[in-house]
Image: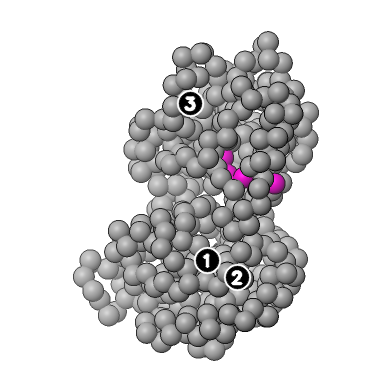
Amino acid sequence: MAPNNGKSSPSLPKVLFHNPASFIGGAEVGLLNCLSVLQALIDPIVILPGEGVLTEELRRRKIKVEIVELPNSLARVSRLGNKFLSLLRGAPALPIYLKQLQDVIGKHEPELLYSNGLKSHFLLALLAKWNGLPLMCHVRDVLGAVPGLHYLLNNVAQAVVTNSKATLEALTVPSAKAFIIPNAIDLATWDEEARQRPPIIVEMLRAKGQPLIVSAGKLVPLKGFSILIKALAKLPKEKLDLHLAIAGSEDYATQDGHEEELQELIKELGLQSRVTLLGNVTPLAPLLQNAHLFVLASKSEGFGRVVAEAMASRCPVIASNVGGLKELVGSEGERGLLFEVGNVKELSEKMASLLADEEKRKALALNGRAYVERELTLGKLRDRLIAALAPLL
């Protein structure tokens, strides 16, 4: 692949990306980083379902965007297994949507299709077959029994990228076409953002001398925030007068009302003065930079970007012993502490132990940052992506 010198060059291979959302979540940050390191080597075109923060950011970076509105029947599906496939087969709007995608392919004549998300994998697989184009699927979640997915990855995709060993192990993909490429952190941007003024809660807690525990993610049951809140309730207030701040909002697709359930739990446990749901926090770096501890109690994680971001912020981490989180944290005490999924008592004990051990927190913080600087850089991401893309272009 020849480098892009900033001028339009017909020699650059065109790669058509499809992303099912126009907001910026973890998968979209991953996509932006991929585009950032590849933009000098390819001519990218990104299909999005509408206007949004991601759309604006891509245009700011002078990356071509095609808006193809995603039918509501597909937009509201979020990893629903059999229900997803039944929708895919039966949604009346699907043929029209596929025709619109086909028109984009005819307009740009890409050399490769690149899917970023479960819906994208299925949609682009159809288009890849129809057009005889190679397909690269970027799988970012631990996906087990999704009917048709394993067939797609084995028989349609030419390359499958996963963000962790755990994500790959949940699939049955031949090693010859599988590439484990962890998410990256743009450390220069992250460190610059970390110097911005933090949310007001940081200053309030600092004035009270209260330690701050942070967690972050979409407010969905999968993220285990209820487990974390229950673990906090078990901490002795007379010894550990601290505050938990959770950054995030409800699932954009389902709007399942989990925030209300969490607020009810906080009230039930009498933690109104000790837990705050902050909503979306952008940028997140200043909050993590001022946290004494970051905790993620997820029931499943393909990678765990917020844990990597906490490590980049030199914030000690406790995470559930699951999926890609195990790979990020490493062995117990290497770059963080692990607890068994759903074990409220164990999580509470490890939080108390780590909060009482300043030297341990410092050691974990330094080890975590060193790991990010060594393994999760944009340079590493670029080299790994080139190795995956080179045989297809």
Query: Measured from the top left, where is residue 23 in percent x and y?
Result: 47, 56
Of the pair 89 and 267, the residue shown nearer to us = 267
| Whether label 2 touches label 3, CB < 8 Å | no
Looking at the rendered structure, the kind of residue marked 1 is Pro
Q: Does the magenta stretch include residue 218?
A: yes
**Residue under label 2:** 74
Between the C-alphas of marks 3 and 1, the distance is 34 Å
* Label 1 Cα crowd, 10 Å radius (few <14 / some 14-19 / many 20+): many
Looking at the rendered structure, the kind of residue marked 2 is Leu
**Residue under label 1:** 20
* Label 3 Cα crowd, 10 Å radius (few <14 / some 14-19 / many 20+): some
**Residue under label 3:** 201
Query: Measured from the top left, where is residue 120 in percent x and y?
Result: 56, 71
Query: Measured from the top left, where is residue 210 in percent x and y?
Result: 55, 16
Q: In this view, does 22 lie above or below 311?
A: below
Q: Is residue 278 above or below residue 64?
A: above
Question: From this viewpoint, is residue 38 visible?
Answer: yes
> Magenta span covers which residues?
216-221
Magenta stretch, overall SS: loop
Q: Does the magenta stretch include residue 157?
A: no
Q: Nearer the viewer, mark 2 or mark 1?
A: 2
Which image quadrant: the C terminus? bottom left
The mark nearer the N terminus, 2 or 1, is 1
Between the C-alphas of marks 2 and 3, the distance is 38 Å
Query: Measured from the top left, where is residue 60 in percent x and y?
Result: 30, 58
